[in-house]
């Protein structure tokens, strides 16, 4: 039977996510109810293969889900975004049991790439992996900003190779593995429920079969598999916030009246034209995201360039629109009940998430000027 995932998503958002969005932001608690509902509705297994119980949907379908989630709750959207990015690797290189668990909505995964030593330079892990001579591998690391830290069931984990040449090796590490420690409780400006915390590994032992791909090939896998998912879905995340902000602004302008003039704010030229600018900026980002998805689907020559551009385009657009809507709605935007200031804070995250806007612009320049990315 055809899986009507937009209808399933709309139901989960209406019943489990949107009603809790403000409380998730205020408390900073991980939105377990929403994530469980996404799993039960088949949405955590959206991009998993149908032969292991997943929905077998595309990156474009995943982008739709992330956009709608972000419009309702940024924390739920970011958690799901990281899960889809991790799932892409697990689908390609993971074990059948984990793949089936994800496909059935019973397993939440995430990426553990950023580190205290190399910060946003995810391509240069400092964490180590060494063989203990008995068929297992020992991991040591100081990971930073791991979304769903202590909440996910597994981490797609980067380290230096343990035997081969190359910059990186990837592992699937169960989150309950002895020696893993989540440090602190996330208390951020935005995305307050996404449990983005440091995770340390102290002589963590995993089976050699936990490797994802070949030893030393992790960077190539990350660039070919993870990065397109992460960058495209991050753009969808920003777009969802932008659209929600535009919707809030439009409703505010139409219902707010200057009684001494007998006109709504929408009837004021300054407000109307500024709204039009912000709406157009949102539509520009939507068009760029759709072109990126089209380029990937068609295998166009410029697909890689579009992927490198899309997160930066959307992240900067979201910051611009969020700031513009705050100004457009005035003092009303500062009140939590309108939802503008929450989305304003959430919108600031994308531009500083690795790879940052500055790093992506450098990649774009390198790619178009014939220089190596690294």
Image (tube, rainbow, N blue to C red):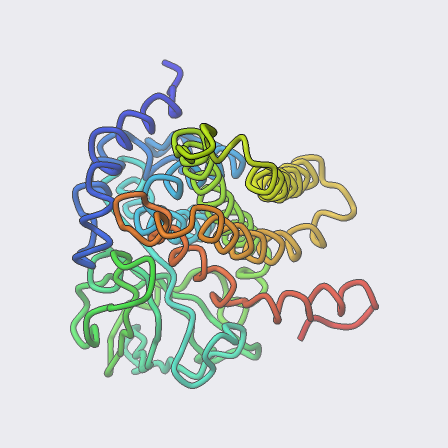
Residue lying at 30% horizontally and 40% vertically, measured from the top left: 100
Q: Where is residue 281 in the image (x, y as percent from the top left)?
A: 62, 44
Image check: 100 left or right of 291?
Answer: left
Image check: 73 left or right of 244?
Answer: left
Residue lying at 20% horizontally and 42% vertically, measured from the top left: 20
Q: Position of residue 361 (x, y in %)?
A: 68, 66
Residue lying at 74% horizontally and 72% vertically, measured from the top left: 372
Camera-side residue of 345 and 110:
345
Count of picture labels: 0
Camera-side residue of 374 and 255:
255
Q: Quadrant of residue 9?
A: top left
Image check: 271 left or right of 145?
Answer: right
The vertical placement of 253 against 108, above or below, is: above
Image check: 132 left or right of 171?
Answer: left
The vertical placement of 320 against 215, above or below, is: above
**Quadrant including the N terminus:** top left
């Amino acid at each position: 039977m055809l899986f009507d995932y937009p209808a399933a998503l709309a139901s989960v958002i209406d019943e489990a996510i949107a009603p809790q969005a403000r409380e998730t932001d205020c408390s900073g608690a991980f939105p377990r109810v929403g994530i469980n509902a996404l799993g039960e509705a088949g949405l955590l297994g959206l991009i998993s293969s149908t032969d292991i119980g997943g929905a077998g949907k595309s990156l474009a379908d995943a982008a739709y889900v992330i956009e709608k989630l972000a419009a309702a709750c940024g924390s739920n959207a970011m958690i799901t975004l990281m899960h889809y990015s991790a799932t892409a690797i697990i689908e390609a290189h993971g074990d059948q049991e984990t793949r089936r668990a994800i496909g059935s909505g019973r397993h939440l995964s995430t990426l553990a790439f950023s580190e205290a030593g190399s910060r946003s330079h995810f391509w240069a892990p400092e964490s180590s992996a060494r063989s203990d001579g008995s068929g297992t591998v020992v991991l040591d690391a100081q990971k930073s900003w791991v979304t769903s830290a202590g909440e996910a069931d597994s981490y797609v984990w980067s380290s230096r190779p343990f035997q081969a040449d190359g910059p990186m090796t990837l592992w699937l590490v169960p989150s309950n593995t002895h020696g893993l420690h989540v440090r602190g409780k996330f208390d951020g400006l935005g995305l307050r429920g996404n449990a983005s915390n440091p995770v340390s590994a102290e002589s963590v032992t995993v089976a050699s079969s936990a490797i994802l791909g070949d030893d030393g090939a992790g960077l190539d896998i990350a660039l070919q598999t993870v990065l397109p998912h992460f960058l495209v879905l991050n753009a969808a995340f920003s777009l969802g916030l932008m659209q929600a902000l535009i919707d809030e602004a439009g409703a505010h302008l139409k219902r707010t009246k200057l009684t001494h003039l007998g006109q709504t704010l929408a009837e004021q030229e300054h407000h109307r034209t500024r709204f039009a600018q912000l709406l157009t900026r949102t539509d520009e980002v939507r068009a760029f995201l759709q072109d990126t998805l089209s380029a990937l689907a068609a295998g166009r020559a410029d697909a890689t360039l579009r992927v490198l551009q899309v997160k930066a385009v959307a992240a900067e657009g979201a910051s611009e629109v969020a700031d513009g809507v705050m100004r457009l709605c005035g003092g009303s935007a500062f009140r939590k009940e309108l939802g503008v200031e929450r989305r304003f804070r959430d919108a600031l995250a994308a531009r500083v998430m690795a790879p940052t806007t500055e790093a992506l612009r450098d990649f774009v320049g390198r790619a178009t000027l014939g220089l190596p990315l690294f």
